Structure formats: C-alpha cells, structure tokens
C-alpha cells in the first residue's frame, strides 16, 4: 500500500480515493477536531519541506499529501519507525 500511495502522490491525487481516506481517518478517530488538527499540522510541515526543497512544483497539495500519509500510517502502523 505504501508503494501505491507514492504512486498517488507522484501522479496526482484521485479525488474519490482522497475522500475515502479522509472519511476513514475521521471515522476511526475518537476526536474529529484533533484529527483535523493533525492533518493541518502535517500539511504545514510538508509545505515547509517543499519550500526548503527549492520550490519544486508539485501537483499534489500539502493537505492531500498529509491525508494520504496519515491514512497509510493508520492502516499500516507496523511500518512506522521506532
């Protein structure tokens, strides 16, 4: 699934897949507000990461990347470092 998410990120985001991932994150959380804050914080980190990377143009917005990453982490927690 990780390889699939990198394909999604590199080729652009399928809106229906992104919606399903977002709904899954919200549905499986105990606090919708905190989940929204996590997505926003991750998106902000990615935006600054992109900025530090010499402003490479990306077709995927930071919020979209954040949803894909957090969804993958939720679905496959054994792949997280540590």
Image (cartoon, helix red, strand yellow):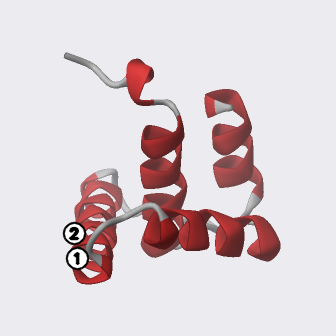
Q: Label 2 neighbourhood size at 10 Å, few (<14), some (14-19), many (20+)?
A: some
Q: Nearer the viewer, mark 2 or mark 1?
A: 1
Which quadrant of the view contains residue 12? Answer: bottom right
Picture quadrant of residue 50: bottom left
SS type, badge 1? helix
Q: Is residue 59 left or right of 42 when viewed as pictured?
A: right
Q: How many marks?
A: 2
Q: Where is residue 11 in the image (x, y as percent from the top left)?
A: 77, 54
- Residue 79, image x, y percentages: 43, 21
Question: Which residue in the structure is indicated by mark 1?
Answer: 37
The disc placed on residue 41 is 2
- Find residue 41 and report its horizontal and vertical position in percent: 21, 69
Q: Residue at x 65, y 43 (%)?
A: 5
Vertical position of residue 70 compared to residue 34: above or below:
above
- Per the model, the C-alpha gap separating discs 2 and 1 is 6 Å
Q: Which of 72/9 is in front?
A: 72
Does residue 56 appear anywhere in the picture?
A: no
In-front residue for pair 28/14: 28
Residue in the picture at 55% in, 71% down? 22
Q: Which residue lies furthest to the front in this view?
A: 30
User: Is any atom of residue 45 visible in this view?
Assistant: yes
Residues under numbered marks 2 and 1 in contact, where contact means CB atoms less than 8 Å apart: yes
Q: Residue at x 76, y 64 (%)?
A: 17
Name the residue rendered at 22%, 76% in the picture: 37
**Which quarter of the figure is the N terminus placed in?**
top right
């Amino acid at each position: 699934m990780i390889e699939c998410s990198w394909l999604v990120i590199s080729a652009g985001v399928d809106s229906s897949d992104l919606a399903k991932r977002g709904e899954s994150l919200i549905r499986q959380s105990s606090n919708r507000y905190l989940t929204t804050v996590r997505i926003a914080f991750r998106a902000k980190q990615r935006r600054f990461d992109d900025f530090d990377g010499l402003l490479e143009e990306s077709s995927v917005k930071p919020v979209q990347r954040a949803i894909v990453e957090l969804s993958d982490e939720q679905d496959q927690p054994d792949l997280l470092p540590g």
